[in-house]
Amino acid sequence: MSQHKVSVRILNKEYQFSCEEHERASLLSAADYLNQTMQEIKQRNSTLSSDKVTLMAAMNIAHELIKAQELNQQFDSEVLTTVKKLNDKLEHSLNQSI
């Protein structure tokens, strides 16, 4: 697989990344999301240094990721519980018909 160079702009600075072609859209989406998050933080407090804006954006995104993972685990648990109940009903019905 060959690497392709991708340019992204975050807080008005250009950055170069290398990625596989199939990862390009995801990388651009991530860069857009990061830039949007950092722009919002910078607009709320224009006196923050770039380092602090970056750290706050990283913390916010990490927090969002953790909340999403917890929600995903909750949904997985609910789905497994539902599947188990359906499986139990199916087994009961099959045993009844034998």
Image (cartoon, helix red, strand yellow):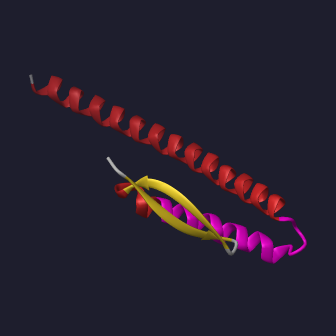
Does the segment drawn in magenta span residue 36?
Answer: yes
Coordinates of residue 60 in the picture (x, y in percent): 71, 56
Coordinates of residue 27 in the picture (x, y in percent): 49, 59
Residue sitting nearer the eye, 52 or 64: 52
Region rendered in magenta: 27-49
Residue 41 visible: yes
Name the residue located 56 percent from the left edge and 45 percent from the top edge.
69
Coordinates of residue 24 in the picture (x, y in percent): 42, 61
Does the segment drawn in magenta span residue 51?
Answer: no
Which secondary structure class fits the magenta region best? helix
Name the residue located 46 percent from the left edge and 60 percent from the top edge.
5
Rendered image quadrant of residue 16: bottom right
Name the residue located 45 percent from the left edge and 40 percent from the top edge.
76
Left or right position of 56 against 94: right
Name the residue located 86 percent from the left edge and 65 percent from the top edge.
49
Residue sitting nearer the eye, 18 or 29: 18
Residue 32 visible: no
* Residue 3 against residue 40 in the figure, above or below: above
Left or right position of 74 against 4: right
The quadrant of the picture occupied by the C terminus is: top left
Coordinates of residue 65 in the picture (x, y in percent): 61, 50
Q: Can you name the residue that lies furthest to the left here?
A: 98
Residue sitting nearer the eye, 11 or 42: 11
* Residue 68 against residue 83 in the figure, above or below: below
